Image (cartoon, rainbow, N blue to C red):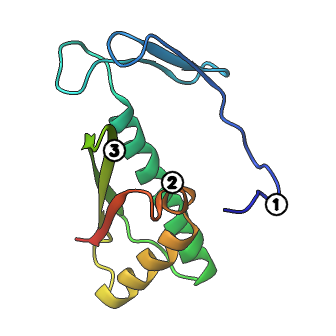
Amino acid sequence: MGTLDKVLYTAKTHASGGRDGGSAHSSDGRLKVVFSRPGGAGDGTNPEQLFAAGWSACFIGAMQVVAMRQKITLPPGTAIDAEVDLGPSGDAFGIAARLNISLPGMERDAAQSLIEAAHQICPYSRATRGNIDATITLV
């Protein structure tokens, strides 16, 4: 893994209390979340939901960059339904993920090519490549 050529942005958060009743907030005040255990009681979110939302948004951004470079336009309704699994992995815990990508009306081969190129430049895809079971599917 290489180093960054230039830092474009640094996210800063503070978390306390963990999954069960904990909370986190960003240094700029834009993010304030309360945590609840996955499937448990409470109104909070969990790290897996945040990861699914973050990777989806980042991947759409990567598709926008690829589309701009290829001088094409992403179709209206471009969306990702993400699923992130949490479970035991030996003596530790692990995650697996699926990104189901919708590019309505786009020719299938062109859409698949765009997705593959985005998967190469998306920071979340790069960070997880070879580390988790991840499936990226054009739906």
Label 1: how many Cα within 10 Å (few below 14, some 14–19, many 20+): few
**Mark 2 secondary-structure assignment:** helix
Residue sitting nearer the eye, 80 or 68: 80
Kindly identify which residue carries mark 2. 58
Badge 3 amino acid: Gly
> What is the residue that sits farthest to the front in this orientation?
91
Residue 72, image x, y percentages? 52, 81
Q: Which residue is mark 3?
A: 94
Q: Residue at x 76, y 58 (%)?
A: 3
Is 55 positioned to the left or the right of 40 in the image? right
- Residue 13 versus residue 64: which sits nearer the camera? 13
Q: Quadrant of the C terminus?
A: bottom left
User: Where is residue 114 drawn, in percent x and y?
Assistant: 45, 79
- Quarter-wise, where is residue 42 in the image? top left
Q: Secondary structure at mark 3?
A: strand
The N terminus lies in quadrant: bottom right
**Which of label 2 and label 1 is nearer to you?**
1
Q: Residue at x 53, y 59 (%)?
A: 61
Q: Nearer the viewer, residue 54 or 75?
A: 54
Are there few (<14), some (14-19), or many (20+) residues within 10 Å of tag 2? some
135, above or below 91, in the image: below
Q: Is residue 42 left or right of residue 30?
A: left
Which secondary structure lies at badge 1?
A: loop
- Which numbered mark, 3 or 2, is in the foreground of this view? 3
The residue at which mark 1 appears reads as: 5
Q: CA distance from mark 3 to mark 2?
A: 21 Å
- The first of marks 3 and 1 along the sequence is 1
Three-letter code, disc 2: Cys
Determine the image quadrant of residue 94.
Answer: top left
The mark that comes first in sequence, 2 or 1, is: 1
Residue 20 placed where, x, y %?
Answer: 32, 13
